[in-house]
Amino acid sequence: VGDPKCNPEQVFEAKKKKTSSASKLLRSFHESDMISRIPCVGKDSAKRSNSNDVDLNHPFIATTEMLSEHGNPALDCLQSYIDSLVELGRLNDDKLGIHFWTEWKAHITAEADFKITTTTTSSTKKRKRSSATKITTTVSVPKIGALSLHNGSIARKTVRAMIKSGMGNHLGVLDLTGSHTLTDIEIEKLLKATPYLQRLSLKNCRKLTGNSLISIAHHCPQLKCLDVGGCYNMTTVQILEILPSLPKLEELYASGLGWNDLGLEQLTDARSWKGLGIGFSPLLTAHAIREFLSTSQRHLERLAIPFCEQAVDNGLLGFLGRSLSAVSALDIRGNPVNSLTFWLDGRVATDDSNVQELFVLARYTNITKATLEETKRVHPIHSAELQCVIDGTGIGVGIRR
């Protein structure tokens, strides 16, 4: 990786129909019991801290559903290679071609595809007699995994190579955060080739517009989580318009799109959310957050309301702690709050016996180490599972989402 001349296309190219040495090495990982797995992201990884990357969804691909269950040392090696290219500023549109993505696909498909059995009942009527027939069908679903191209300068060539390799059928989680070179055209082509995509991050992809949202609505029926925070060429109205086409969507992170009270009302009326991000919204009021979140979002597990200074204060924190008892990840960066005691006061008032994990991102607030210690003294039991980030740490901890 350190050598600018390092070319993965040459490394993984099969010459004279013979598997390359690099491919043989990686594929041997599946057969060896001596290979201990070190995840490329998550709590046990060696990912370096970077304060600019600490948010509620980082790292996006560190999901228990995809990374730990379907990952393997070979995939971790390939993902670490991509991450290294990004850190060195060498992940451009010429770097990852069809041979690399064919190799990635090979390690996803190293194990057999799994099957889903569904049973449907059909009834037929003849005069007054009716009969019901049960039809059992088995659908083979390709094995899927997670991929991060976070901050990569990718565009037409990379997308074309990914599609041509057929790896899109095996993508379950895709992180394209910060890919400023991607356009609506590339996103549409890529999403057409990823029918099993469940989690997608387009955060801070600044060239994307509402047309990409339309592509998501048309091509991602299995989508459960979407992050479009910072995509300022999209609007909250466009977000609301695609929701009926995404019936499985349960997590939406759309901070920075200018939510107002009416938009929040429509968003919370649409469904009960597990994860919600509505930060950087100066038009939101504390009254709307109180009314719409507390009444319809009792099952909310992850909430991001950073930099809503006009609405979020200690009083609102206490109210939300009392109303949203299921929240386990909270982003309150940039808000004028000085203690988490208020949140725990509210939680204790709801259920004094329930001790729950709580991860809080509180950079750029008035919360300090001293106020955290005070919170732990006031609530020694309920703060036992409290983790609060007030500085540049926190990256790579595999925040539950």
Image (spheres, grey):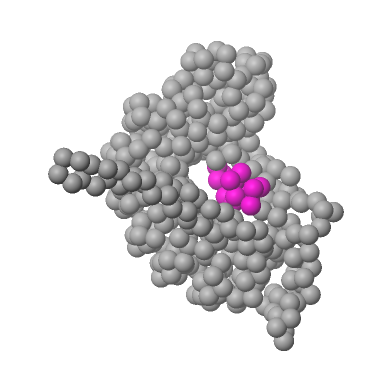
The location of residue 60, given as percent across then percent down, is 57, 50
Residue at screen point 58% across, 33% down: 360
For residue 277: magenta? Answer: no
Please report the bounds of the magenta region as a residue range: 54-70
Q: Does 373 appear above or below 214?
A: above
Q: Does 99 appear above or below 306?
A: below
- State the residue in front, 319 or 81: 81
* Quarter placement of the C terminus: top right
Count all numbered tags in the image, as a single digit: 0
- Rendering quarter of residue 385: top right
Residue at screen point 41% across, 46% down: 119
- Looking at the image, the residue that sits furthest to the right is 34
The location of residue 244, given as percent across then percent down, is 31, 48
Residue at screen point 38% across, 26% down: 294
Q: Does 183 appear above or below 147?
A: below
Q: Using the rendered image of the protein, determine whether residue 321 is visible from the camera's viewpoint.
A: yes
- State the residue in front, 291 or 137: 137
- Looking at the image, the residue that sits furthest to the left is 127
- Rendering quarter of residue 109: bottom right
- Looking at the image, the residue that sits furthest to the bottom is 16
Q: Is residue 111 left or right of residue 31?
A: left
* Quarter placement of the N terminus: bottom right
Q: Is residue 309 left or right of residue 262?
A: right
For residue 59: magenta? Answer: yes
The location of residue 181, given as percent across then percent down, is 50, 68
The location of residue 263, given as percent across then percent down, is 30, 41
Residue at screen point 66% across, 19% down: 376
Q: Using the rendered image of the protein, determine whether residue 263 is visible from the camera's viewpoint.
A: no
